[in-house]
Amino acid sequence: MRRSGRRPGNQDTREAILAAARTIFAERGFDKTSIRAIATAAEVDPALVHHYFGTKDKLFLASMDMPLDPGELVPEALDGPREEAGERLVRLVLTVWDSPAGKAAVALLRSAMSNEWTARLLREFIITQVLRKAIAELGMEGDDAPLRAALVATQIGGLAMVRYVLKVEPIASQDPETLVRAIAPTVQRYLVGELS
Amino acid sequence: MRRSGRRPGNQDTREAILAAARTIFAERGFDKTSIRAIATAAEVDPALVHHYFGTKDKLFLASMDMPLDPGELVPEALDGPREEAGERLVRLVLTVWDSPAGKAAVALLRSAMSNEWTARLLREFIITQVLRKAIAELGMEGDDAPLRAALVATQIGGLAMVRYVLKVEPIASQDPETLVRAIAPTVQRYLVGELS
């Protein structure tokens, strides 16, 4: 049943767009989703989607209730000497997750792990918003760049899971710099070191 | 309301014991939970709990629907030359999760991540059934042994999350030996190498 006419309130329109975005991003993946397709599903004009959310990246982040934009954080973390990239990345992750935004991120990770559908959204997020931007920022050009970036995701994701979601001691209450010293060499090797 | 008398069927009794075990293990943690307390909560004789489930470890695994016993797997993985412990551990994890038991483990990890209560059970499992047994098996005696074991958990847990739950490529379909070569040095360093 097609509803007729525009929804009355702005809030309803925003919610309809976000719901359509979640469904279509999860179904087709980020790359194959267009603003136009989301607008059609939400029964609004594509210009309205742009008006409310800006870019497809921003709409994707909004549809996931993502409190932070890796498009801004990743370049900040990776800007600087290449040999310190691992250290800066681990420190940034701990700073962000130890901050108030971390609570929202825990909720997001929980929800994303809980079923296949939400896991797809998180996978799309990790690949398109984090890994792809990190690869571009570091100018990684080898065929193994996607593998390297995904290896970093295993270590960073596992750290977040153990420290913030499962809260396994002594990681949960360890001071951040001890963790940076222990884990940075791993991330550094995955980014630019020997893989075998 | 206290129900009177013993439950009629064995299946009901087993389920009542398992439900009581889940609640009490999550509330008090593994170490502070006794078979007696679980028997009391399930309104059965402690001897019956022993009869059905054997040890407290076994009851704990059964209460989590854990398809595998790390008490058997961990010693198997860590037995052998110390300098290859990381490699054997990563290979075992991939072998187990790539097997049919892996599907059950994915379901378990999903459920465990989804709320605070189930996360507590997984945390207790990781600490008492995996990390503690690994520390004992390797004869790790330093004050930093719990930190080292938990660091291993960040890498192994993150690998499982990215490969099996979120299915991020190219990790999801990567051949196991490539992953072993890339990740084993990390686990090896966390176990016995320099942490800072």
Image (spheres, coloured by chain):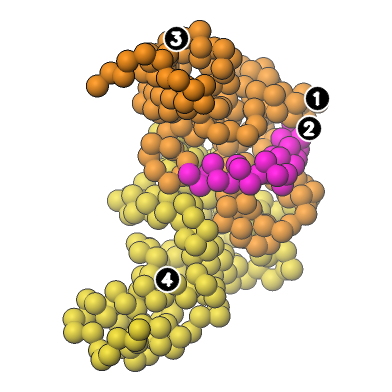
Chain colours: A orange, B yellow
Dot 1 crowding, Cα within 10 Å, few <14, some 14–19, many 20+: few
User: Looking at the image, which is closer to me, B151 or A71?
Assistant: A71
Residues tagged by mark 3 and mark 4 found on one chain of the structure: no
> Which chain contains the residue that carries disc 2?
A
> Which chain contains the residue that carries disc 4?
B
Question: Which disc number belongs to residue A80?
Answer: 1
What residue sits right under mark 3 in the picture? A45
Residues tagged by mark 3 and mark 1 found on one chain of the structure: yes
Question: Going 73% across and 37% down the picture, which residue do you hit?
Answer: A92
Quarter holding residue B69? bottom left
What residue sits right under mark 4 in the picture? B22
Q: Main secondary structure of the magenta part?
A: helix
The reply to whether the C-beta atoms of the residues labelled 1 and 4 are less than 8 Å apart is: no
> How far is the residue under mark 2 from the one under mark 4?
45 Å
Q: Looking at the picture, which amino acid does disc 3 mark?
A: Asp
Give the vertical position of A23 relative to A170 (above or below): above
Q: Which residues are magenta?
A: A84-111
Q: Secondary structure at mark 2?
A: helix
- Which image quarter holds the N terminus of chain B? bottom left
Q: Looking at the picture, which amino acid does disc 4 mark?
A: Arg
> How far is the residue under mark 1 from the one under mark 2?
7 Å
Would you say residue B74 sits in the magenta stretch?
no
Looking at the rendered image, the disc whose residue lies closer to the viewer, 3 or 4, is 3
Dot 3 crowding, Cα within 10 Å, few <14, some 14–19, many 20+: some
> Which chain contains the residue that carries disc 1?
A
Whole-percent x, y for residue A140 in the image: 64, 20
